Amino acid sequence: MAANVLKAEETVPMQEGLKGVVADWSADKQAFRMPWGKAMMWIFLLSDTFIFTCFLTSYMNVRISTTDTWPNPSEVFALHIGGTDVPLLLIAIMTMVLITSSGTMAMAVNFGYRRDRTRTALLMFATAALGLSFVGMQAFEWTKLIVEGVRPWGNPMGAAQFGSSFFMITGFHGLHVSGGVIYLTVVALRVLSGFYDRKGTYETVEIAGLYWHFVDLVWVFIFAFFYLW
Amino acid sequence: MDQAVERVMPDTAHHAEGQQHPIRIYLWIWALLFVFSAFSYMVDYFQLQGALRWALILILMFGKAGFIVAVFMHMAWERLALKLVVLVPPLALLVLIGLMAAEGDYTLLTRLASFTP
């Protein structure tokens, strides 16, 4: 009986556009034609979008409502190099590192679907290494700010809310990057061991890729709203 | 493909073919992300101010976000059902942002009226 239903489904062509949406949702079948892990990763990323937006919105709220001047991120995050202050240099480097890691990850997913085990694993290790260097630079940045007296409850540069917003937002993002580094390393080791060849699918690489690109995506918004605004 | 196999793993078969794109696309997007990031850094480096600064920051930000989601996360090739599930709910956040902006203004005005000399 169930087999008959499945067979009928396979022969019906999939509709496109809004009719396709209605058909996908209302038919007595799987709504998303993709591995369940991938659908669940998208749902997780959607919930994570809400979490990060809540952080950024609360940052917006405290920045609008404070009567003190907000510390100028351009100066706060400047690096002193060769006798001059280069504004926001470390953040620019961190941004480039994360974008590079997103590129290597995209290529890893591509090679995964081509069943190129070595290249996939190598590109994923490269991605994880770039992620690790990102976290390292973030640790350097945190240390620098803490030494300068920035605390969650106040700082010498201006509005007290600067510290709590900074540590909360970049800390939560850094936690995502750290988690991603571990996640990617585990998947890369499994790629190398031939685990996904035995399983018959490299979908896990694509799912890990979705997570990693999302971490990069969140940084795009943090970079724009916290560092540039 | 054998019917029985198709029934057990319909998605694998669909995907092995569905999500393979030429490496060239990724390299292009990668380069564009670098260029956009460099531009947004320039906005700060040359200390552009006012409406121009905010407009540029937002345009570059949404450009980068769009490239990442559409190409790197393969959203451009997904079915509309998934696109709607992922992209529509965040619109509710615009309401939150609007409310919190209004709230922030109100708090600022109250503070200025009552707590500053």
Image (spheres, coloured by chain):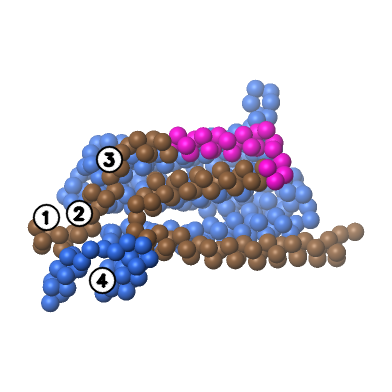
Report the Cα–Cα distance between label 1 and label 3. 23 Å
Report the Cα–Cα distance between label 4 and label 1. 21 Å
Location of residue B79 (image quadrant): bottom left
Q: Dot 3: what SS?
A: helix
Q: Residue at x 28, y 73 (%)?
A: A27
Q: Residue at x 28, y 45 (%)?
A: B20
Query: Are tags 1 and 3 found on a single chain?
Result: no
Residue on which the image places disc 4: A29
Q: Nearer the viewer, mark 3 or mark 2?
A: 2
Tell me whether the residue at label 1 lies in contact with that at label 2, contact meaning CB atoms closer than 8 angstroms. Answer: yes
Q: What secondary structure prevails in the magenta region?
A: helix
Disc number for residue B13: 2
Across and down, in percent, residue A50 comes to 51, 62
Q: Dot 1: what SS?
A: loop
Reply yes or no: does residue B24 show up in magenta.
Answer: no
Q: Amino acid at mark 4?
A: Lys
Q: Residues within 10 Å of mark 3 (few under 14, many from 20)?
A: many
Q: Amino acid at mark 3?
A: Phe
Disc number for residue A19: none
Residue on which the image places disc 3: A111
Q: Amino acid at mark 2?
A: Ala
Q: Colour of chain A?
A: blue
Specify the subunit that label 4 lies on.
Answer: A
Location of residue A87 (image quadrant): top right
Where is A172 relative to A143, above or below? below
